[in-house]
Image (tube, rainbow, N blue to C red):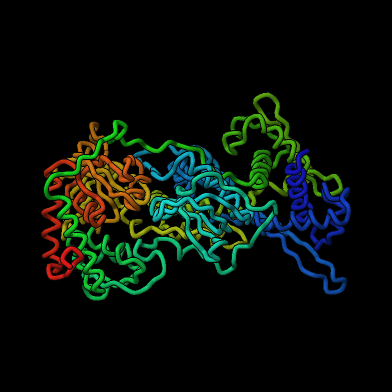
Amino acid sequence: MSHDTDKLIRQLSLVAFLMAELRPLTARDVKGNVEGYSEMSDEAFARRFYSDRAELVALGVPLHSQRDEFTGEELYTLRSDRYFLPPLELSDEELSALQTSFFLLEGQFAYAEPLRLALQNLALGRGGLGNAPTGGGLRVEVLDPDYSPELSGRLGKLEAAISKQRTVRFPYRAISTNELIERTINPYALLPDNGSWYVVGQDLERQAIRTFRVSRISGEIRFATRRERDFRIPADFAIEPYRGIPPWQRGEITGEGRVRVAEATAWWVERLYGDRGRIDGDEFVTPTASLPHLASWVLRQDGRAVPLAPAELRKLCAEALRQVKASHEGDAPLPNVPAELSLEIVAPERLAGPVVPERFAVLQALLAFLLAACGDGKDATIAASDIVERFRIPEDQLQEHLSLLNLVNFGGGCYTIYAELEGDHVRVDKELFGDTFRAAPRLTPLEARAIRLALEFVGPMIAAESDTPLERVRRKLEETFGEFELAQTPEPQAGGEEDLVATLAQGIRGRRLVQIEYLKEGADTSSSRLVEPHEIERRLPHWYIHTFDRTADGERSFRLDRMQSAVLTDETFEPREEFEPGEFRGARVATLLYAPGETARRRLERGGAVELSDGSTLAITPVGSPDWLVQEVLAHRGEAVVVEPADLRALVAQRAGELVKELGLGRVKVKAEA
């Protein structure tokens, strides 16, 4: 047998032995009775037993130890009521909605396989919940634009390093300098944020915690040592402070910016950045590490935000507006457009989840499933294809998994199960201690992380499907997570959109019109729209609703973070057979040129662009609204230029000139006038 197989047999047998005994056990008891230890020398046993205990605890197995006050020996216990899942308080509707979320995420979610295993355990004994949802009236599409085959492999390697607490090395391309530098870090957590994946950890060269975008890792991720563990994640580490950081707060905070916001849009600013600043009357006050990035945000608001302080912020905005105006007057630049540059928008490839569940956890869940199939009887016959599909076990490895379970005993030769592959079925015989393991084990930390991240990705849909507040679903689930902290996994946030998703989902199911208040990009105030909701889309990091807009008499897509309210009406509508939701269908296109440097590199990594010989980047961009294009160009502060069409170039130049006056920047001295 392989080293890994021997270890699995030892660990599973150790769990079984500790649970069978009602008294605390010594290490001597374990060595004399548990499969795999008895032939070891005392030195080898001490080393292996310590390693196995540590791994089991890391897997969420509630193995406890205490010192005997008389003999001084360490005593070990494992209570069955703490090993198995407690009675699950989720309703069938809530669990079904959670299971539906898996099918929404499959192929776009790094933790899809641990999530599948967690749902298998949660649904054990509840009929019908292991099958794919039948659908009904609600259509949801989940897309992760940052997901790719390369990213998939990196996420899997980093998750393994985090769970094993191993130091890693990798080449990393810094976006600000374009340098490729070897980094050595102790990885603490993986974080999905604003549509991208990041790894947070201790940078050993800088001796500080740093955040690295996973897609910027160039090349192989390697373990730095051959040790089983290199570090421990600090007890006080929490991932929350590293998420949702606006660009102007990345780095050392050196001051604060003050920006006047329009009364009609203050709600939107507070929804997005309320925890990163404060609304003081008609001013948004926010700590700053980078005034240029705050200036970009101000200019993107296209007049709805006025820079007040410090003076440097006003100067940056004035310089940017004059540069944008100058670059869009006169003749357009004439770059050579490569033949490979096109507007084709390709949906991300559906990939298998790269983060695989621990083999120990798969065997735990498989054992519970096989025994549950026996019920109160002594045997059962199960289709092999069902097991392969449920647990994602390769067909040629199924018998190996079954053989491992056959070797698990309680010490002294008392076994749990005998399972054998016979043709296309698995024959299961429940052994003497089989009933002990009929219940599902508690979730492992990895499975718990998978559920938390699933809630982060599609939590509002789960709440809408189950008609249950997201916080309540999260709280119920976390009661089953076991005895470990998840400080390295972000808590799910609805982002103020949970109620909106629930209302729009009701509208889709019931074919009812919805009245929405929507703040369009470039508008000073919200507008009221009467819409037929047809399809909800989760394109990270935003939620969208694709509708037929009765007010505008045409197909329209709306971003939910810009939706102030949504109210169901009593009026119904008939489905439109010709309706094919698509945010950019029929949109105009514009060619944009990004100046060499960080701006060009950032645009290149978004995809759909090419790098030119001078280091600039050229992109053909769909333009759903001229207002959006104006804001996109303004936000780049002169680093992006519209090449064509001419009327949109003129519109950008005109708007930049108008904003100098509207923002009160006409008297601000800039470099060009010095």
Residue at 63%, 55% (x, y): give it.
166
Q: Position of residue 609 (x, y in %)?
A: 32, 41
| Closer-to-camera residue (575/128) | 575
Q: Position of residue 657 (x, y in %)?
A: 12, 58
| Closer-to-camera residue (229/457) | 229
Image quarter of residue 362: top right
Query: Outermost residue, front direction?
Result: 674
Q: Position of residue 628 (x, y in %)?
A: 21, 50
Let me know if residue 143 appears in the view: yes
Q: Give the quadrant of the C terminus.
A: bottom left
Residue at 50%, 43% (x, y): give it.
152
Q: Is residue 237 above or below residue 13?
A: below
Q: Total number of numbered labels? A: 0
Q: Is residue 378 above or below residue 325?
A: above
| Closer-to-camera residue (463/450) | 450
Q: Give the quadrant of the N terminus.
A: top right
Taking 468 as reference, is 49 left or right?
A: right
Q: Position of residue 535 (x, y in %)?
A: 30, 42
Residue at 71%, 39% (x, y): give it.
377
Let me know if residue 443 appears in the view: no
Query: Outermost residue, top direction?
Result: 423
Q: Is residue 362 above or below residue 164?
A: above
